[in-house]
Image (spheres, rainbow, N blue to C red):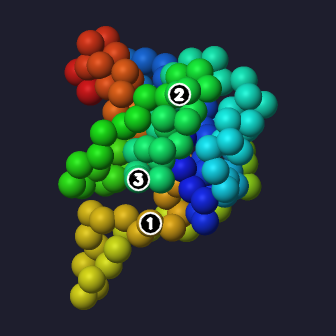
């Protein structure tokens, strides 16, 4: 989940399948709209009936929302942020053969996602506009999934 009050709060469902060459990551956008507060997010999570881990954003707004959601019994696991973490989450997705459930918002992000360009050179820094679903998906692959891939992947990805 990637929190947003002006930008969209995005909830994605991810699943992984280990394969001999490259693990597959399945992504489904479940929610894509701004949320005014943690109560609104809580209602959305109740409607979606999320049964397991919710890997989430940890920005300053999210920290208060995370505490509120945890108090309401939601299984939130905030992802640690560090310098370059957005790029790390997004590039971690490149380790997978990605399959997305068709969704207009997923398509919009796929078509508009881009990296910053300075003096004609592409940087590793993403433009923070069409990356909310990618960020949410990235949170899931840097948690337990990484340990699973490293432990069981036949090619040591």
Question: Which disc is residue 128 wearing?
Answer: 1
**Horizontal side of residue 94 vs 105, given as left or right:** left
Q: Nearer the N terminus, badge 2 or badge 3?
A: 3
Query: Is residue 21 among what the camera can see?
Result: no
- At which x and y percent is residue 78? 41, 35
Contact flag, marks 2 and 3 (Cβ < 8 Å): no
Labels 3 and 1 touching (C-beta < 8 A): no
Residue with the mark numbered 3 = 60
Q: Which residue is drawn at 48% across and 44% down?
A: 64
Q: Position of residue 16 (x, y in %)?
A: 49, 23
Q: How many marks?
A: 3
Badge 1: how crowded within 10 Å, few (<14), some, or many (20+)?
Answer: few
Nearer the observer: mark 3 or 1; the answer is 3
56 lies left or right of 39: left
Q: Distance between the residues labelled 2 and 3?
A: 16 Å
Residue ID at (37%, 37%):
79
Q: How far apart are marks 3 and 1 (CA)?
A: 16 Å
Q: Identify the residue at image location x=36%, y=28%.
A: 143
Image quarter hosting the C terminus:
top left
Q: Earlier in the sequence, mark 1 or mark 2?
A: 2
* Residue to which mark 2 is pinned: 70
User: Element at badge 1?
Assistant: loop
């Amino acid at each position: 989940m990637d929190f947003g009050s002006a930008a969209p709060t995005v909830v994605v469902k991810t699943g992984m399948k280990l394969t001999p060459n490259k693990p597959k990551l399945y992504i489904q956008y479940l929610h894509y709209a701004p949320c005014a507060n943690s109560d609104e997010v809580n209602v959305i999570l109740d409607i979606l009936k999320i049964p397991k881990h919710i890997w989430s954003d940890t920005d300053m707004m999210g920290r208060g929302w995370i505490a509120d959601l945890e108090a309401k019994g939601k299984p939130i696991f905030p992802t640690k942020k560090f310098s370059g973490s957005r790029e790390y989450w997004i590039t971690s997705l490149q380790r997978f053969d990605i399959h997305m459930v068709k969704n207009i918002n997923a398509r919009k992000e796929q078509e508009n996602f881009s990296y910053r360009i300075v003096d004609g050179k592409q940087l590793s820094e993403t433009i923070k506009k069409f990356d909310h679903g990618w960020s949410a998906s990235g949170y899931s692959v840097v948690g337990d999934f990484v340990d699973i891939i490293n432990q069981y992947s036949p090619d040591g990805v």
